């Protein structure tokens, strides 16, 4: 499968930057919830399983001091998760890696140890009942940046919708989440929310066009914009009472940090200096408040003045929360959690590898931290442990294939230091990861097999600068030699004795059951994918409109009418579908061959490259996007025999889908960035 490179990458990143300057679904409510042949390891001993609760056994009965009469139960919710407890999107796609899900989490708050809520990108809302995490229906794909509540029936989540460039405010009444009418403020992003009661709630953010301060207030009936605000951009908010509220943020040029204060009547500039911007704030009392920000900055208020504290880090601090003045936690963008014991700050946990965006706790021995990639960590009296799991947190998964719903392989690579090939196996109950020296220095781009005991994977050996083919015999993976300094991108066979691999500079390799040989392709263009109807009818596609067809004797060029990049091919009967991206833009397109004529479905309205195509029949075809819908959440396409339509996955921007495969129309898998595996089926 093709990687994002060259002009496509440049154009794609340019569009991303533009949209970032100008301006992410789960299901419903809480439930109870291998080296050469010498040294190859089977799947590791810690698979992600459908039956894994991913949780600690926490019996902490302490509640947050700011919560009034909170009920530890949440029995009035409709459970729309899969029966196995997975988090699923509104369009029916369920996360299988990471678990419980893979969208960034930006905020966390709880009413009790058995009622904890998390909010994140693509409208993600999660609930923890003390046993396991489940998804909640948000009815939005907006980025949710923060969450706060005054009990299990009065919870607010705020953020912004990339698509409409409007503020998003959601309210939970104990049964359902719903958008609040005045939450759609134009050109506004909201970053934090806090209240003294359900009828006194504040949300802070900015006008994204003018970079001016926005603070909204809810009085129990309506949200309204507060007036006469100091010039600032608020990032975090916390209060000791309705008349003692603090906002941490930055100057409107985003160069310096500041603190705003509200006395119940008006906002004023409390503190400003030339120091780095601030992002999070929390206090034990009105006269003991901590604020954190860029470059490891921490300042503390003693009731009279703000003073700098030594954090011991230079990373950006994103969030702060404490149980007492001598038990305070802060998190950073490197995945670390700092702790203040009343005397000094020190690193308390460095086990997370992605940004930790928010911290909240019910007590000093019941603390939660959430962050990028769906990270969830929990601290009890024994220390920090993971609630979330991933077999391939930094992997790009480029290929997927299987023989049945209980025998599926996903492949790709990780690049944290040396390259490492990634091979995951799903048995219908969960996923496990293969290990072994055979995967060292590998990128794996595609996978195909004849049967469970005869599986091939192709890519490149990064160290050797050569093509790579691995073979699985039912017990272990071993290396094969396809020959040549090429990168192999696509793989298909009519049998275990008739396998084709295609790759860079027109490379085609063929395996006859005994050895790999070099075939003449007649082109120097990169070939990105291969598929066939039979041993005498095989198709390969590549850059600059390259289409080749093999008749059992030789390869010949096919004029498809395109000069753009072709990334994936699949067919059914006389129908052949090819997906790609325009050379001078980031948009995708689909070519369809009906046995006689090629037609193109323009993708000018699809602002992402298309990477792969698969279907269960000619009128049930899917195309994946290794870019993504930049303005909203992860998207891919479906063809019903007449029209191509978008399907919103409910995944955040940044999770591109790279490959698709199914055992049937009712059992389909998508894989992509961040090691993502999503499943749609009965």
Image (tube, rainbow, N blue to C red):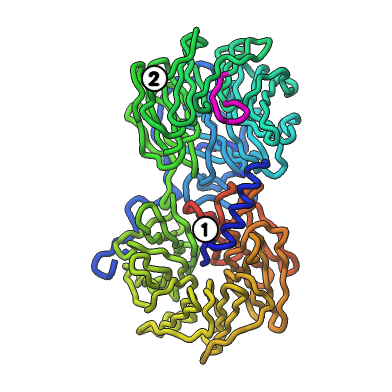
Which residue matches tag 1? Answer: 671
Q: Is residue 255 magenta?
A: yes
Q: Is the magenta stretch mostly helix, strand or loop?
A: loop
Q: Point out the residue furthest to the top here.
A: 304
Graded by Cα atoms within 10 Å as few (under 14), some (14 to 19) or many (20 or more), the crowding at tag 1 reads many
Q: Does the magenta stretch include residue 252?
A: yes
Q: Quadrant of residue 607?
A: bottom right
x, y percentage for residue 489? 48, 70
What range is drawn magenta here?
250-259
- From the viewer's perspective, is 527 left or right of 452? right
x, y percentage for residue 208? 67, 35
The residue that appears at 63% across and 68% down in the rendered structure is: 579
Looking at the rendered structure, the secondary structure element under dot 2 is: strand
Relative height, residue 675 to residue 213 (above, below) = below
Quadrant location, the C terminus: bottom right
Relative height, residue 638 to residue 353 (above, below) = below
Q: 22 or 280, which lies in front?
A: 22
Q: 65 or 562, which lies in front?
A: 562
The residue that appears at 66% across and 34% down in the rendered structure is: 189
Q: Point out the residue furthest to the left here.
A: 38
- From the viewer's perspective, is 142 left or right of 468? right
Looking at the rendered structure, the secondary structure element under dot 1 is: strand
Graded by Cα atoms within 10 Å as few (under 14), some (14 to 19) or many (20 or more), the crowding at tag 2 reads some
The residue that appears at 67% across and 79% down in the rendered structure is: 560
Q: Quadrant of residue 548?
A: bottom right
The residue that appears at 36% across and 23% down in the rendered structure is: 345
Which residue matches tag 2? Answer: 327
Q: Across the whole image, how many numbered discs are drawn on residues? A: 2
x, y percentage for residue 377? 42, 36
- From the viewer's perspective, is 71 left or right of 501? right
Q: 488 or 221, which lies in front?
A: 488
Which tag, 1 or 2, sits closer to the chain's start?
2
């Amino acid at each position: 499968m093709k990687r994002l490179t060259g002009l496509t990458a440049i154009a794609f990143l340019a569009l991303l930057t533009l949209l970032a300057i100008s301006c992410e679904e789960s299901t419903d409510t809480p439930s109870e919830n291998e080296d050469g042949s010498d040294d190859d390891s089977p799947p590791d001993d810690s698979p992600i399983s459908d039956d894994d609760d991913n949780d600690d056994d926490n019996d902490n009965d302490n509640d947050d001091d700011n919560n009034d009469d909170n009920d530890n139960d949440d029995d009035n919710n409709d459970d729309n998760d899969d029966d196995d407890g997975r988090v699923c999107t509104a369009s029916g796609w369920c996360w299988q890696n990471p678990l419980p899900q893979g969208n960034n989490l930006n905020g966390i708050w709880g009413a009790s140890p058995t009622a904890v809520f998390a909010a994140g990108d693509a409208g993600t809302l999660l609930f923890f009942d003390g046993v396991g995490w489940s998804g909640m229906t948000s009815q939005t794909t907006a980025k949710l940046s923060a969450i706060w509540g005054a009990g299990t029936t009065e919870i607010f989540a705020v953020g912004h919708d990339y698509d409409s460039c409007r503020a998003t405010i959601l309210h939970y009444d104990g049964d359902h989440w719903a958008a609040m009418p005045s939450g759609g403020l134009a050109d506004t992003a909201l970053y934090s929310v806090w209240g003294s009661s359900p009828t006194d709630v504040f949300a802070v953010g900015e006008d994204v066009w003018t970079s001016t301060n926005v603070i909204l207030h809810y009085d129990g009936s309506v949200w309204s914009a507060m007036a006469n605000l100091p010039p600032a951009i608020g990032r975090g908010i916390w209060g000791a009472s309705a008349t003692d509220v603090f906002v941490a943020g930055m100057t409107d040029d985003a160069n310096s940090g500041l603190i705003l204060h509200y006395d119940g009547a008006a906002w004023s500039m409390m503190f400003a200096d030339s120091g780095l911007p601030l992002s999070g704030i929390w206090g034990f009392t009105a006269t003991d408040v901590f604020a954190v920000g860029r470059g490891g900055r921490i300042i503390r208020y003693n009731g009279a003045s703000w003073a700098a504290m030594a954090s011991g880090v230079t990373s950006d601090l994103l969030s702060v929360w404490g149980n007492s003045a001598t038990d305070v936690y802060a998190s950073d963008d490197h995945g670390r959690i700092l702790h203040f014991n009343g005397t000094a700050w020190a690193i308390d946990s460095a086990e997370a590898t992605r940004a930790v965006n928010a911290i909240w706790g019910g007590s000093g021995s019941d603390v939660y931290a959430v962050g990028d990639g769906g990270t969830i960590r929990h601290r009890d009296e024994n220390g920090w442990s993971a609630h979330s799991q991933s077999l391939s947190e930094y992997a790009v998964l480029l290929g997927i294939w299987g023989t049945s719903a209980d025998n599926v392989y996903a492949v790709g690579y990780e690049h944290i230091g040396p390259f490492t090939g990634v091979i995951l196996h799903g048995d219908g109950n969960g996923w496990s990861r293969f290990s072994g020296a055979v995967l060292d220095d590998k990128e794996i781009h595609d996978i195909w097999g004849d049967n469970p005991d005869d599986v091939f994977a192709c890519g490149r050996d990064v160290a050797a600068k050569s093509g790579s083919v691995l073979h699985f015999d039912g017990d272990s993976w071993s290396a094969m030699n396809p020959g040549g300094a090429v990168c192999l991108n696509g793989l298909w066979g009519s049998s275990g004795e008739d396998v084709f691999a295609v790759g860079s500079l027109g490379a085609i390799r063929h395996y006859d059951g005994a050895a790999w040989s070099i075939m003449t392709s007649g082109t120097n263009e990169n070939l990105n994918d291969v598929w066939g109807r039979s041993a005498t009818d095989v198709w390969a596609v590549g850059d600059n409109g390259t289409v080749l067809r093999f008749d059992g004797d030789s390869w010949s060029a096919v004029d498809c009418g395109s000069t753009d990049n072709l990334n994936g091919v699949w067919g059914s009967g006389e129908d052949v579908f090819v997906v790609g991206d325009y050379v001078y833009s980031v948009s995708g397109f689909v070519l369809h061959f009906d046995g006689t004529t090629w037609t193109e479905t323009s993708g000018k309205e699809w602002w992402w490259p298309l990477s792969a195509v698969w279907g269960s029949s000619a009128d049930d075809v899917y195309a994946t996007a290794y870019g993504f819908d930049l303005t909203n959440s992860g998207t891919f396409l479906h063809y019903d025999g007449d029209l191509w339509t978008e399907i919103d996955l409910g995944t955040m921007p940044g999770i591109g889908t790279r490959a698709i495969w199914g055992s049937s129309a009712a059992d389909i898998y998508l894989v992509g960035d961040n090691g993502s595996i999503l499943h749609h089926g009965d």
